[in-house]
Image: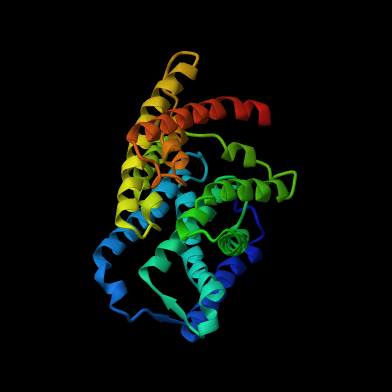
Amino acid sequence: MSSKYPRSVRRCLPLCALTLEAALILLFYFFTHYDASLEDQKGLVASYQVGQDLTVMAAIGLGFLTSSFRRHSWSSVAFNLFMLALGVQWAILLDGFLSQFPSGKVVITLFSIRLATMSAMSVLISAGAVLGKVNLAQLVVMVLVEVTALGTLRMVISNIFNTDYHMNLRHFYVFAAYFGLTVAWCLPKPLPKGTEDNDQRATIPSLSAMLGALFLWMFWPSVNSALLRSPIQRKNAMFNTYYALAVSVVTAISGSSLAHPQRKISMTYVHSAVLAGGVAVGTSCHLIPSPWLAMVLGLVAGLISIGGAKCLPVCCN
């Protein structure tokens, strides 16, 4: 990521981040405590496994998915982990303040950690639009603002439409995408010299990006089922997500070869298209009664993703 700032500014950025972390520690000290009920302990192993899947997706999957850019492949992984850790802490506090604070304390459960991880993942998606163009302080502000906006929006939707956690958090992909585009549009222009070179992709980092896509592909059923409480709904969500992902992989690889002038597989298209099926069935994954419906959604989503990756850069540039 970009580091073309005065030395005095670069020295202040880590101190600001440490000061913010100290403030978060104080907030946790005064306003939080762990859940001591037996209900949360019964499903400890299963709940922890789902939370671990989400963490692997966020830290490794999204981290390496954005590592294909030539000049900041490793820094993107480091900043990704930084935003994830900071975002989870703030999301837990924010969700507690919005929903539990009238009782005086924020109760931390495994479910609240899963919910906070998914909220923080929205920031990691948005960061893909500003890679190489922001510094540490700007990322901190972006994390705090986006997590706050997403949490508030989720609470408003829940109160107005009386939806559960699964339904009112299914829009976070779209929210994250448009939030990232808005931040990129608001950045000062012209961009620093050499920023355009940062967007060029290299072959070896592209392998790391594909590694991230593979992790996301493997654990995406956990994302779509993480906030569902019914075992039957969770099972249907995992099955339908798997079938949609399987079809989107076949569609992505075939479609990328078809879209290439020399009929070669373009990994730039494959990175995102292999996940299109999981995103497409996200909201309704627990409601789909038959696998063929999920497979059709995966096929259509893969084709749309390939078409968008082929045409949108030309239109935007």
Quadrant (top left/top right/bottom left/bottom right) for the C terminus: top right
Q: Decide: is 128 above or below 17.
A: above
How many numbered marks have been drawn onto this rendered protein structure? 0
**Residue 298 in sight from this viewpoint:** yes
Where residue 184 appears, x then y in whole percent? Answer: 66, 47
Q: Residue furthest right?
A: 189
Q: Depth check: 11 or 169 in front?
A: 169
**Residue 1 in sight from this viewpoint:** no
Residue depicted at x 63% and y 59%: 138
Asked which quadrant contains residue 150, the reply is bottom right
Where residue 206 appears, x then y in whole percent? Answer: 43, 35
Where residue 84 appears, x then y in whole percent? Answer: 47, 60
Residue depicted at x 61% and y 63%: 156
Where residue 161 appears, x then y in whole percent? Answer: 58, 58
Q: Depth check: 12 or 243 in front?
A: 243
Q: Residue furthest top?
A: 262
Q: Decide: is 189 above or below 136.
A: above
Residue depicted at x 47% and y 60%: 165
Asked which quadrant contains residue 47, the reply is bottom left
Colour convention: rainbow
